[in-house]
Amino acid sequence: MAQSFTVQLNVGGHRIENVSLNWGLMGSEARQDAPSYGTDIEVPAVVELLDLIASGAIAAEEARDNLNRLATVINERMDREYDELIEAMERPRSARKQERFDDRWVYAISTDENPDSIKIGVAKDIAQRVKSLQVGSATRLELRWSARGGYPLERYLHNQFEEVCTHSEWFDFRGVSDAVAEIDMTAREFLRRYNDAQRAETAPPAC
């Protein structure tokens, strides 16, 4: 289920337009532990990056971190879509219109350097996801909050905090006295409504 993307690379104030990326074309197993594994970039764009590095316009570390972050975002997005597709196919046809509870972890992380900039994502294994994201971050990432609820809860939180979304799954909580408490309260409201709806569906009919 390979997918192609056209993106713009922004590195050190320099922009490389219309870069072709592919996801799902697995390469050598020698690099399968890399966070960017499964995502390929066109060679001409790599040459442009190398030219910028050779000229001193950008640092090699900056280019590497930028590519790792981009690949991580794409891998997360495609993993999510793939899992949702498989779940939909495995679900009984009569139940496919009903959204089931998802027990994956929804998490909130931020860096020590900028604790108000928080990423809200979903993962089966939080420790592994944080480890993967850390590769593309120059500062230490801290897990701030987590709860089970999977993609439905993640989507709900993204929608609720849409106004402070800066890009992708990152949100700017500057001005919020306790961002973690705000996220937790919003998540609890969603889970309470879900549990109430489930109880209503399973309650025996009134006589």
Image: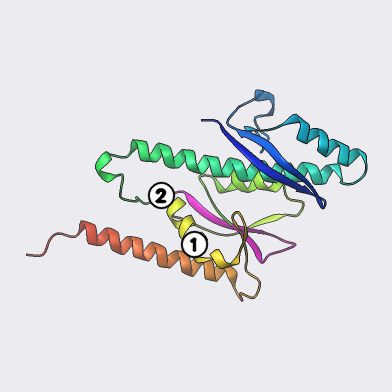
Q: Residues within 10 Å of mark 1 (few under 14, many from 20)?
A: few
Where residue 34 appears, x then y in whole percent? Answer: 68, 35
Above or below — where is 120 with respect to 59? below
Residue name at image x 82 percent, y 51 percent: 12
Query: Which one is earlier in the sequence, the residue at label 2 or at label 1?
Result: 2
Residue name at image x 27 percent, y 45 percent: 95
Q: Amino acid at mark 1?
A: Asn
For label 1, the SS is: helix
Q: Residues within 10 Å of mark 2 (few under 14, many from 20)?
A: few
Where residue 80 appears, x then y in whole percent? Answer: 50, 43
Report which residue position mark 1 lands on: 159
- Which picture quadrant has residue 87? top left
Observer-nearest of 160 and 183: 160
Q: Is residue 155 magenta?
A: no
Work out which residue is located at the far right of the displayed protein and give it.
55
Report which residue position mark 2 lands on: 102
Q: Is residue 47 left or right of residue 56?
A: left
Residue name at image x 42 percent, y 39 percent: 85
Q: Amino acid at mark 2?
A: Asp
For label 2, the SS is: loop
Where residue 137 appears, x then y in whole percent? Answer: 73, 50
Where residue 103 appears, x then y in whole percent? Answer: 42, 49
Q: Which mark is residue 182?
A: none
Q: Is residue 2 left or right of residue 53?
A: left
Work out which residue is located at the far left of the displayed protein and give it.
207
Residue name at image x 61 percent, y 39 percent: 5
Q: Which residues are magenta?
A: 102-119
Tell me the quarter of the image containing the C terminus: bottom left
Observer-nearest of 127 and 14: 14
